[in-house]
Image: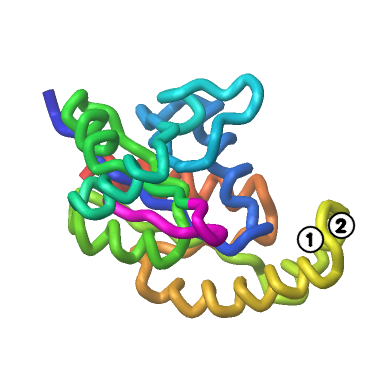
Amino acid sequence: MKAGKIIIISAPSGCGKSTIINALLKKGEIDMEFSVSATNRPPRDGEKHGVNYWFLTDEEFHNAIANGEFVEYEEVYPGRFYGTLRREVERRCEEGHNVILDIDVKGGVNVKKMFGNRALSLFIEPPSIEELRNRLISRATDSMEEIEKRVGKAAYELSFAPQYDARVVNDNLDEAIARTDRIIKDFIAK
């Protein structure tokens, strides 16, 4: 059995990364499994351990960090951690499945360095910062203050794009899905 490959997809908030990933998974043309992340936050109603997240205690999460068990992790809010367990990625690859990681830009760069040619790093970007701002406003889920924070963070995150293997500008969702699909299929076929 051939070992699976790793597909890293990163993007600033509001660029359509999750929509693109979900569309590809729904199409089902690529043997890809979504990596289940770990977190130290408590489960929400209906969430299951090992399905939605690997729910770890604070102590378990910190021990996993100390033992180098994560391919990447981030303290998203003070005291609230999320990360990708190395054993989760390795197990799925050993089973012959390709693993898709939806991770932040710094984590994406680090995971690519860790796995080298076994991994494809793909960056989804907006047509412009102004268009990203408009998308976040049209979502109507955040205050203007929160939107400006996200836009400021996005400008910083866009500076990481040149470190990725491939970039897809999401100015038309169907085209962005199709381009992402082609890039991943070409990578897996190598």
Please say if 120 is above or below 100.
below
- Answer whether residue 18 is magenta in the image: no
Badge 1 is on which residue? Answer: 135
* Farthest residue, direction front: 59
Measured as percent of width and height from the top left, residue 3 is found at 16, 33
Q: Residue at x 29, y 57 (%)?
A: 111
The label shown at residue 138 is 2
Q: Which mark is residue 97?
A: none
Please indicate whether residue 156 sits to the left or right of residue 116 in the image: right
129 is higher (above) or lower (below) than 186: below
Find numbered disc 2 in the image and state the secondary structure of the residue it sits on: helix
Q: Badge 1: how crowded within 10 Å, few (<14), some, or many (20+)? A: some
- The quadrant of the rendering that contains the C terminus is top left
Instruction: Name the residue located 57 percent from the left edge and 24 percent from the top edge.
Output: 47
Q: Main secondary structure of the magenta part?
A: strand
The percent coordinates of residue 18 (x first, y second) are 59, 44
- In what quadrant of the picture does the N terminus appear? top left
Query: Which percent across, then down, holds residue 150?
Result: 68, 68
Q: Residue at x 43, y 58 (%)?
A: 74
Distance between the Cα atoms at labels 2 and 1? 5 Å
Can residue 189 be seen in this snapshot?
no
Amino acid under label 2? Ser
Q: Secondary structure at mark 1?
A: helix
Task: Please tell me which residue lies in front, 65 or 16.
Answer: 65
Tell me if residue 167 comes above or below residue 45 in the rendering. Answer: below
Question: Mark 1: which amino acid?
Answer: Arg
Q: Given contact means CB atoms under 8 Å apart, are the residues at marks 2 and 1 in contact?
A: yes
Q: How is the image coloured?
A: rainbow
Residue name at image x 18 percent, y 50 percent? 67
Magenta range is: 70-80
